[in-house]
């Protein structure tokens, strides 16, 4: 997966590099050049999976095989529930406050922290 710097499109990095660098030249954010679409059948199949399995399939689809231990990273990060509650016909609410800090950021922050720690090879890093 290649990501490019939104402020300097000549700077492109791998997903691992983007996680380690955090931000590009001129304080630019890294953004994916292309996301391959899921087919309708693939989306239907994803909806039948639990949070961990669905997240593993989605992130593998986007990132590819760049991070070998991605499945175990996701499993360890999402060790809490994400209940889906029916509000009324065809309307549901996903409770995104079930993580350790009771905030939506838990979903992204936990994955990123674990990906980062798995790729710095025991070096000290200040975030």
Image (tube, helix red, strand yellow):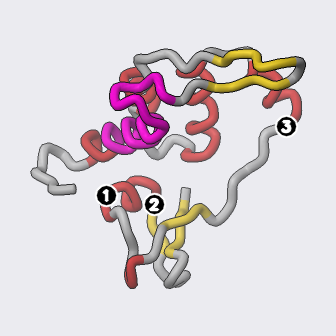
The structure residue drawn at horizontal position 39% and vertical position 74%, both measured from the top left corner, is 24
Q: In the orientation shown, which residue stands out farthest toward the left?
A: 124
Lower sequence index among marks 2 and 1 = 2
Is 83 magenta? The answer is: no
Q: Is residue 125 left or right of residue 17?
A: left
Cβ–Cβ below 8 Å for labels 2 and 1?
no
Q: Nearer the viewer, residue 85 or 15?
A: 85
- Kindly report the distance in space between the C-alpha atoms of the residues bearing marks 1 and 3: 32 Å
The structure residue drawn at horizontal position 47% and vertical position 69%, both measured from the top left corner, is 29
Q: In this view, does 60 lie to the left or right of 15?
A: right
The structure residue drawn at horizontal position 38% and vertical position 44%, both measured from the top left corner, is 112
Lower sequence index among marks 2 and 3 = 2
**Residue 24, placed above or below residue 62:** below
- Kindly report the distance in space between the C-alpha atoms of the residues bearing marks 2 and 1: 10 Å
Q: How many labels does the image show?
A: 3
Q: In the orientation shown, which residue stands out farthest toward the front?
A: 87
Task: State which quadrant residue 42 falls in.
Answer: top right
Q: Please tell me how crowded label 3 is: few (under 14), some (14-19), or many (20+) other residues with Cα within 10 Å.
A: few
Disc 1 target residue: 20
**Residue 27, placed above or below residue 119:** below
* Callout 1: SS: helix
Task: State which quadrant residue 64 falls in.
Answer: top right
Q: In this view, does 37 lie to the left or right of 108?
A: right
Q: In the picture, which quadrant includes the C terminus? A: bottom left
Per the rendered image, the range of residues in magenta is 97-115
* Callout 2: SS: strand
């Amino acid at each position: 997966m290649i990501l490019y710097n939104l402020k300097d499109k000549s700077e492109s990095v791998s997903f691992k590099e983007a996680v380690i660098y955090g931000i590009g030249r001129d304080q630019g954010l890294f953004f994916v050049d292309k996301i391959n679409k899921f087919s309708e059948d693939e989306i239907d199949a994803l909806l039948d999976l639990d949070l961990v399995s669905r997240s593993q399939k989605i992130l593998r689809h986007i990132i590819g095989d760049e991070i070998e231990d991605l499945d175990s990273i996701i499993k360890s990060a999402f060790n809490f529930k994400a209940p889906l509650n029916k509000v009324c016909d065809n309307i549901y609410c996903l409770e995104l406050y079930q993580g350790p800090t009771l905030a939506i950021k838990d979903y992204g922050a936990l994955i990123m922290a674990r990906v980062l720690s798995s790729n710095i090879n025991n070096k000290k890093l200040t975030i």
